[in-house]
Image (tube, rainbow, N blue to C red):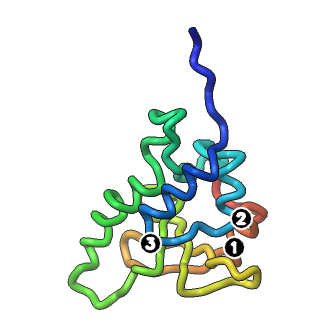
């Protein structure tokens, strides 16, 4: 019996992740996950939502990264007054920098803007108005 590889996810899996994260994922990101959960954008790994149909492929989920790896990086900035609570990482770029949704700033579509967060400085640079705009960026890494 061969296991069928699952591409995409379900609304239930997205809602479960949102509940664990305590925030609603941007619609363009949720729509992308429904069709592409667990896929990469070239060399860029987009964190999936955990899906019980394919737990191995989705283990390194957005919730897993947020609760473990992200919190470990933030400890490096615990002696500063910088507040990163509005950020939700959705992809790792390079060796510790993250693409994040910045829930403190909404783009033209009403969704959180996409920023690149530096693990070395904690600085954030806005790179796109939304996840949909991020996907359409020319020269996007990956």
How many angstroms separate mark 3 from mark 2 (CA)? 24 Å
Q: Which residue is mark 2?
A: 28
Q: Which residue is mark 1?
A: 130
Residue reaching furthest left? 79
Work out whether mark 1 precedes mark 3 in sequence or the reverse, and give the earlier one.
Answer: 3
For image coordinates 52% across by 50% down, the residue present is 49
Residue 69 at x, y percent in the picture: 34, 58
- The correct choice, above or below, for 140 with respect to 50 in the image is below
Residue 103 at x, y percent in the picture: 54, 80
Work out whether mark 3 precedes mark 2 in sequence or the reverse, and give the earlier one.
Answer: 2
Residue 46 at x, y percent in the picture: 57, 52
Q: Residues within 10 Å of mark 1 (few under 14, many from 20)?
A: many
How many angstroms separate mark 2 from mark 1 (CA)? 8 Å
Contact? badges 3 and 2 (CB < 8 Å): no
Is residue 15 rendered to the left or right of residue 8? Answer: left
For image coordinates 58% across by 67% down, the residue present is 25
Q: Residues within 10 Å of mark 3 (few under 14, many from 20)?
A: some
Q: Which residue is mark 3?
A: 118
Disc 1 on helix, strand or loop?
loop
Residue reaching furthest bottom? 81
- Location of the N terminus (image quadrant): top right
Q: Residues within 10 Å of mark 2 (few under 14, many from 20)?
A: some
Residue 92 seen from this side = no
Front disc: 2 or 1 = 2
Q: Nearer the viewer, residue 45 or 108?
A: 108
Contact? badges 2 and 1 (CB < 8 Å): yes
For image coordinates 56% across by 70% down, the residue present is 24
Work out whether mark 2 precedes mark 1 in sequence or the reverse, and give the earlier one.
Answer: 2
Say which quarter of the image contains residue 126.
Answer: bottom right
């Amino acid at each position: 019996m061969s296991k069928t590889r699952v591409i995409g996810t379900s609304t239930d899996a997205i809602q479960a992740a949102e509940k664990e994260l305590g925030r609603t994922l941007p619609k363009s990101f949720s729509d992308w996950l429904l069709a592409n959960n667990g896929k990469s954008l070239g060399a860029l790994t987009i964190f999936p939502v955990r899906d019980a149909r394919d737990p191995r492929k989705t283990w390194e989920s957005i919730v897993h990264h947020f609760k473990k790896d992200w919190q470990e990086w933030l400890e490096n900035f615990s002696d500063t007054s910088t507040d990163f609570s509005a950020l939700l990482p959705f992809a790792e770029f390079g060796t510790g920098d993250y693409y994040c949704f910045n829930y403190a700033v909404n783009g033209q579509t009403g969704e959180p803007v996409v920023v690149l967060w530096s693990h070395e400085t904690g600085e954030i640079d806005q790179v796109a108005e939304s996840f949909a705009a991020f996907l359409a960026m020319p020269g996007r890494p990956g």
